[in-house]
Amino acid sequence: MKMEKMNDYASELEKTCLENDNISPRLFEEYGVNQGLRDENGKGVLTGLTNISKIVSSKIVDNQKVSCDGELWYRGYRVEDLIHHLDEDEFGYEKIAFLLLAGKMPNRQEEAEFKKMIGESRTLPTNFTRDVIMKAPSEDVMNSMTRSILTLASYDKRAKDTSISNSLRQCIQLISEFPLLAVYGYNAYNHYEKNDSMFIHHPDKKLSTAENLLMMMRPDKKYTVTEAKVLDTALILHMEHGGGNNSTFTTRVVTSSGSDTYSTMAAAMSSLKGPKHGGANIKVMEMMDDIRKHVKDYSDEEEIDAYLRKIVDKEAFDKKGLIYGMGHAVYSISDPRERVFKGYVKKLAEEKQRQKDLQLYENIEKLAPKIIAEKRHIYKGVSPNVDFYSGFVYDMLGIPVELYTAMFAVARVVGWSAHRIEELICTDKIIRPAYMSVMEEKSL
C-alpha cells in the first residue's frame, strides 16, 4: 500500500517537473551549449588529454578530412597487432592489462610477475560470497557487483589512501576480483531467484581470466581452447576505448574529486550499466530473436531486407527505428574491434555448428548499412560495431544474458584503472564544467 501511494504521488509530481524542468532547445543553440558534450556533427568536445589509447576514424588527405577504416590504439600499438601477435593458444588479457596500466609492454619476467599477482589476488575476503553476494541476490548483476565493490572497501584498511602505489594495488585487486563478483553474483541470483542448482567454483591461479570465467560459470568446469581464446579476445577488445566514453569519463571525474578507488569504480559501473553504453549488446540479441521469429530463410536477402526496412520504419521490433549493432558515435567506415572479432566469431560458430545463425548476422551486416543510408540519409558510412557480434559470441559460449554487461565490466575495469592512475599523476584539478542558468527570477 505504501508503495502504491508513493507511485501515485510521484506520478502527480512528474507533471509539475515536466512543466518546470523543460528547457527550450533554442536556448542550447543560442548559448552555444553542446548537449552530450558533442558538437553538431556528433564529434566529442575536447575535455582532456590521454596517453592510454587513441581512436582514429578519419584522416586529412589534401587538406580535407576523409573518413577511413577505424583504428584503435593501446599505448601506441594497434589493437589488432596486439591480438594477432599472440600465439594461437596464448591468452593476452593479462599481458595487455599490464600494457595499459604501466604504459609499456612487459618483458617475460614482468609478465610472469603480473600474472602471478593477478592469480593470487583472485580471491575474496573470508565469507564475503556468503555474507555479501548471496544475502541480496539480484537479476541486475551490475547492481550486485557495484554493491560488492563498495563493500570491499570495508575490508581494506587503506581504502581512503589515494597515493599512486596504493591506488595501483587496489586497481589490480579489483581487476582480479571482478570475474568472481560477476559469476558469483549471477550464481546467487540463478539459485535463489530462478530456483536452479547452486555451485561455486573457486578460481584456479594458473588459469587465465578467460579460462577462469568459463570454468567458474559451468557446472562441469569444462571448456575448449577455442571458447577461451574467443572470450579472451572479446575481453581485450572491450578493455579500453579512449577517455571520452561515458564510464571512463565518469572514472576521471570521480577520481578528480579526490575520491577513493572503490567509489570511483562503483561510479563507473553505474555508468556502464546504462543501455546507451554497456547494455547495447543485449538490445542486439533481443532484436535478433525478433528477426528470427519473422524471417524464415536466413539466406534469403530479399526477405531479410524487407523486415529490416520495417524495423527502420518503426513498424517492427521495438518500433524505435534502430537496427541495433549498426553505427557508432565515432567510427563510420568500420569499427576495428568488429573487424578483428569477426574472424574469431567464425571459428566459434563452426565449432558450435551455428553457421546458419552466422549467415543471418552476415546478411544483416551486408544489408543494414544500405537501408540505413537510404532511409536516414546517412552517407558518411554506417558499419557494424563490436556489440553486433559480442552478444552472439556470449550466446554461443552459454553465457546468460544477465552477465553480458558484467563481461564488459570485467574487461573495461582495466581501462578505468589506467585512466584513474593517469588522472592522479597528471592533474590535481577537480573536473568542474560550467552550466549556465536560464532560470527566471521571481518575487514572493
Image (cartoon, rainbow, N blue to C red):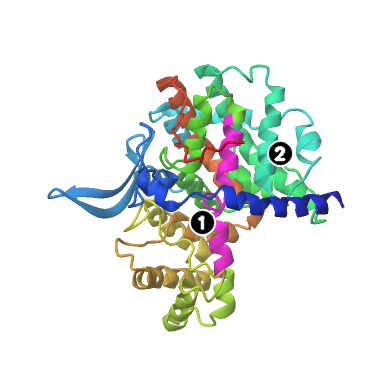
**SS at mark 1?**
helix
242 is higher (above) or lower (below) than 377? above
Q: What whole-number distance in Å separates the C-alpha atoms at marks 1 and 2? A: 26 Å
> Is residue 119 found left or right of 427 in the rendered image?
right
Which residue carries the number 1 mark? 390
Check if mark 1's residue and mark 2's residue have beta carbons within 8 Å: no
Mark 2 Cα shell of 10 Å, populated few (<14), some (14-19), many (≥20): few
What residue is drawn where x is 59% and y is 40%? 269
Chain part drawn in magenta: 264-288
User: What number is the disc on residue 202?
Assistant: 2
Instruction: Please provide percent x and percent y for residue 342.
Output: 43, 59
Name the outermost residue toward the left: 62
Mark carried by residue 342: none
Badge 2 amino acid: His
Image quarter where the C terminus lies is top right
**Few, some or many residues within 10 Å of mark 1 (<14, 14–19, 20+):** many
Seen from the viewer's position, the closer of residues 172 and 17 is: 17
- The quarter holding residue 159 reads top right
- Single out the residue that lies furthest toward the front: 444
Q: Is residue 283 magenta?
A: yes
- At label 1, the amino acid type is Ser
Q: Earlier in the sequence, mark 1 or mark 2?
A: 2
Q: Position of residue 136 (x, y in %)?
A: 79, 42
Q: Residue at image x 22%, y 54%?
A: 66
Task: Reply above or below: 354 against 48.
Answer: below
Number of marks present in the image shown: 2
Residue at horizontal 51 percent and vertical 82 percent from the top = 297
